[in-house]
Amino acid sequence: MTDFKSQIDLQKLPKHVAVIMDGNGRWAKRTGMPRIFGHRNGVKAVRETTEAAAEIGVKYLTLYAFSTENWSRPEAEVNALMTLLVATLGKELKTLTKNDIRLNAIGDLKRLPKDCYNELIKVIDQTKHHQRMTLTLALNYSGRWEIQDAMRKAAFAFKSGDVVNIEELDIEQYLSTQGLPDPEFLIRTSGEQRLSNYLLWQLAYAEFYFTEVMWPDFRKDDFYKALLDYQDRERRFGKTSEQLNV
Ligand code: FPP
């Protein structure tokens, strides 16, 4: 078996990896099971990916767990997902603590069901001093919602005279990812090649990686394999290769 992990150049790691966890429903359907069975099995992939990222030295990992559009799924699936989230957060607190991982969340969190919101805030609070890695869950999140929300906050600041000059407006300070560096790398599972309203502002210069692996099957080695692919790429930020190599 190829040992992907040992081939990774630790000096060339992305600081921030964003993930679109996709394919839970199709994975379950293939085995004739309800979609929630796929989500339940997706939790193992969340744990493996979080551990893999922390072990190798990635500092920020952001997972798309629930989009604002996901509310339009059947009510039973939404409820089951929320229940799963509350249960998982409670159970994983120990692992997060053991691994020195800080939990963070982005999205319109106030609109989450109360028990889900309370559990989330509890775990965020209990892990707030952890240093090794920040795990951000995008929950009730969408990139367009975030940009709208940022504009609302900016307009409010203008009104109250906080921001005097439009040139000084630093959009990033109004985004829900404020304080996090932009992800250099995006992974999407299940063969779909879309952004699905994820981190629209922040992914402007990110490298994209698509794999056919369904999220419930995603393991540490799949994460390391993706990192190796990232390290083969040349990130130019609009410059030429020659400019980069001087
Ligand atoms: C996408 O698969 C997955 C989701 C919308 C939810 C992801 C949630 C989990 C893995 C559960 C727990 C999460 C955490 C953070 C503890 P899909 O339903 O869109 O699959 P499909 O494209 O095959 O229909």
Image (tube, rainbow, N blue to C red):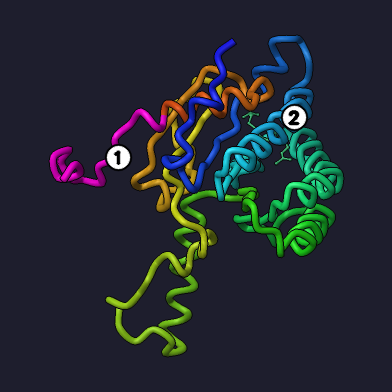
Question: CB of residue at label 1: within 8 Å of ligand 1?
Answer: no
Say if the magenta span includes residue 45: no
Ligand 1 shows up in which quadrant of the image? Answer: top right
Tell which circle, 1 or 2, labels the residue nearer the N-terminal end.
2
Q: How many marks?
A: 2
168 in relation to 52, above or below: below
Residue type, label 2: Lys
Percent of width and height locating residue 53: 60, 39
Q: Nearer the viewer, mark 1 or mark 2?
A: 1
Left or right of residue 100, residue 152 in this image: left
Crowding near the residue tagged with mark 1, few <14, some 14–19, many ≥20 C-alpha atoms within 10 Å: some
243 in relation to 9, above or below: below
Q: Disc 2 marks which residue?
A: 44
Q: Judge by depth and name the residue closer to the eye, 22 or 113.
A: 22
142 in relation to 179, above or below: above
| Residue drawn at point x = 48 percent, y = 80 percent | 156
Point out the stretch of residues depicted in magenta: 230-246
Q: Main secondary structure of the magenta part?
A: loop
Percent of width and height locating residue 181: 46, 56
Question: CB of residue at label 2: within 8 Å of ligand 1?
Answer: no
Q: Disc 1 marks which residue?
A: 235
Left or right of residue 44, residue 154 in this image: left
Q: Judge by depth and name the residue closer to the eye, 144 or 98.
A: 98
Percent of width and height locating residue 128: 71, 63
| Residue drawn at point x = 39 percent, y = 32 percent | 231
Instruction: Give the distance between the C-alpha atoms of the residues marked 1 and 2, in whole angstroms.
Output: 32 Å
